[in-house]
Amino acid sequence: MSASRLREATTRTLYREQSSRRFEQLCRLTGLSNTALAQVLKEKLDRETLTRQTLSGWRSGDQPVPTEAFYAALELAGPDALSFMIREFEDDVAQHFARRANRTQDS
């Protein structure tokens, strides 16, 4: 395994995977292209720059999603997105506790 792949494997946590997956879903719900979304987020986050590459990194999990970007995407995605995210969070929590229970039983 190459050094970069090893570093990626060790820095990608379950939490990063979940947050990037949810961020990706929110980005899709906005209906904006990556270029348009990067521009809108740049303005909402009051950043001097926000490249499509950075946005792609957040969406793919290659880079951690900043909390402020997550909230901005949630706002841009509209009111239905909040209900969607609550259901998804409930599913994530249920899966987490099911995995934990399975590990406890296996011990």
Image: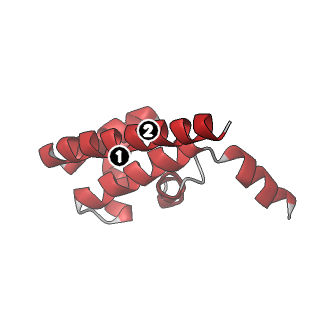
Q: Residue at x 86, y 63 (%)?
A: 2
Q: Earlier in the sequence, mark 2 or mark 1?
A: 1
Q: Nearer the viewer, mark 2 or mark 1?
A: 1
Image height of 12 relative to 60, above or below: above
Quarter of the image with the C terminus is top right
Quarter of the image with the N terminus is bottom right
Left or right side of 106 for 16 = left
Position in image of residue 83 (x %, y %): 18, 42
**Secondary structure of residue under mark 1:** helix
Q: Which mark is residue 47?
A: 2
Residue marked by disc 1: 41
Image height of 78 relative to 35, above or below: above
Proximity of marks 2 and 1: CB atoms separated by less than 8 Å: yes
Frontmost residue, 9 versus 4:
9
Instruction: Determine crowd level at label 1: few under 14, some 14-19, many 20+ residues with C-alpha closer than 10 A.
Output: many
Instruction: Determine crowd level at label 2: few under 14, some 14-19, many 20+ residues with C-alpha closer than 10 A.
Output: few
Q: Residue at x 43, y 44 (%)?
A: 95
* Mark 1 residue type: Leu
Position in image of residue 53 (x %, y %): 53, 59
Q: Can residue 63 be seen? A: yes
Frontmost residue, 83 versus 90:
90
Q: Residue at x 57, y 45 (%)?
A: 14
Position in image of residue 81 (x %, y %): 21, 47
* Mark 2 residue type: Arg
Left or right side of 52 for 90 = left
Left or right side of 76 for 42 = right
Frontmost residue, 24 versus 88:
88
